[in-house]
Amino acid sequence: MIMTEYARTKQKDKPLHEKFEYAQQLFSIVSVDDTGIFELPNSYFSKQFRLSDINFMGVTNSEQAEIINWFSKVLESVPCRFSYIVANEYVDETEFKKEVLYPLAGDKLDTLRHAFNDVISNKLTDAKQGLYQSIYFTLTCKADDMKDARSMFASMDTAIRTAFIDQAAEGIAGSVMSPISTNERMQLLYNFTHIGLHTNFKFDLDEEIKYRRDWLNTISPGSLRFENELFHMNGKVGKVIYIHDYPKVLEADIISKLSQINCTSYISVNNELLPTDVLKKELQRKHMKVGMKIENEKTRNRNQNDYLAEASATLLESNRKIEEFEKEINDEDQHYFNTTITMLFMADDMEHLESIENKVISQASLKSIEFKNCFAMQREGINTCVGLGIQEFKHVCNMSSTSVAMFMPYKTQELNDKGGVYYGINQLSKNAIFANKKKLKNRNSLILGQSGSGKSVAAKLETICSYTVYKDDQFIMIDPNADYYELAGIVGGTVISFDPQKQLFVNPLDVD
């Protein structure tokens, strides 16, 4: 059967292993490079980046429209196959304590630090069950060898990075694209295959080579079994599904709503540029095919002496839509993509998995989206979902760059300064807020609120937090209402009265 050029663009990638026999055949990775580039089957090479979040959900509709327009222009600047993933991943406990919790100093304030660390841990667990949300961006290109791939990624890296930073909306910072090293990429895969197993393992490629270990064995799961509609991995159960039917009108919070479900999940938007000439030829072919059907129906009606009858309304509507699409392609300067959107989620058992699936279907139905299982292709679905840059599963929909941009991965800009003070939970992303005011040019703060809303409590909490984090800093508090003298006693400070009516007072000008 002769395949059209358009049909070839819809073909799936050929897996590295046609038949699955053991756990090491899960990932279709041929080789890895110390620059973070993975060699994939069919002469493909991929490189992964991490995107910083931007404030999308908390701005006005007009500003959201500007961000969508900016994001569509960014996507148009990508010259190769790409995918972006919104991942809810379990954080490593050791790294969590090192990066997030207050470090102990071995002094009398460690009791306070322990108390704060308990509060932070409980708040994060309540907010997202120990999950942390990240955005990954993967580029995939064809190359002759690894050297050629390095050169190609180096040439496109700067342009795409600049496009992400150059945010069009006024007052909103752009997204920073940070490359992920080989060790980090391997660690992400290891964390996925070892969910629920607290091994505290850190992947190191140099050590793998030094001790002649097979890195594929290291990142592979201990046990893995596939069924038609789900898979079992290390005592967990998971499923890969895809969007089968899209709504007529897209909303920009589709990805956001799906990623709010509390579970380990990967929502992957996979895109491949569709050449405009190929799309035009396909539309002409379809236009001709529908036109012939319309003429055949008219001929049949005339043969039945019904000279006034037109073709069926369905055919006429199809013909009208094709004509509109052709006009849109000719008039508008937009890129078109073959887009496949998949979602992977995992649970502790079948009952929990069904509960998560029902929530996903419920959220999708509110957006007029229909999901279907990757039937008998769960392994291919995993490779497509986890950011390798492979598209072993495809159910493509032809989308313009603006339509793809409506599947917005951004929600809210994160504030997570290392060595900062804990300020609470971001209600949009459910991630912790840590701020280090010392990084600001102006460190002044103003706490506003109604009477009884907790302004004094917030100020006292920030004071104690700051005192436990920045133990070498000096704190001077001017307290006309004598609200903070107990606080000074807790942290071992001194209360000095400046009231001239008291028997003992200090002249402020004499204070060193």
Image: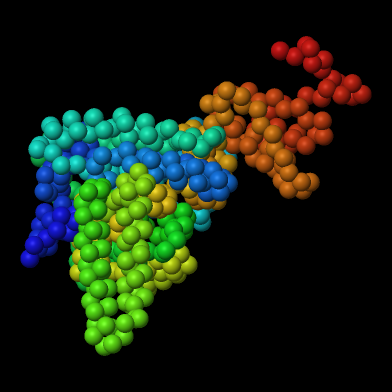
Instruction: Describe residue 211's horizontal placement relative to residue 419 as left or right.
Output: left
Q: Residue at x 28, y 83 (%)?
A: 301
Q: Quadrant of the C terminus?
A: top right
| Position of residue 483 measured from the top left corner of the image (x, y, whole percent) | 78, 37
Q: Residue at x 32, y 31 (%)?
A: 159
Q: Classify residue 498 by image quadrant.
A: top right
Q: Is residue 474 above or below residue 21?
A: above
Instruction: Describe residue 191's horizontal placement relative to residue 447 as left or right.
Output: left
Say which of 133 and 325 sits in front: 325
Instruction: Describe residue 31's horizontal placement relative to residue 115 as left or right.
Output: left
Say which of 439 and 274 sits in front: 274
Q: Quadrant of the N terminus?
A: bottom left
Q: Classify residue 33 by image quadrant.
A: top left
Q: Is residue 30 above or below residue 468?
A: below
What is the image's colouring? rainbow
Q: Residue at x 36, y 69 (%)?
A: 317
| Position of residue 304 measured from the top left corner of the image (x, y, whole percent) | 26, 88
| Position of residue 76 measured from the top left corner of the image (x, y, whole percent) | 33, 42
Say which of 325 and 218 sits in front: 325
In this view, the residue farthest toward the left is 1
Instruction: Describe residue 317's horizontal placement relative to residue 300 as left or right.
Output: right
Q: Classify residue 14 by image quadrant.
A: bottom left
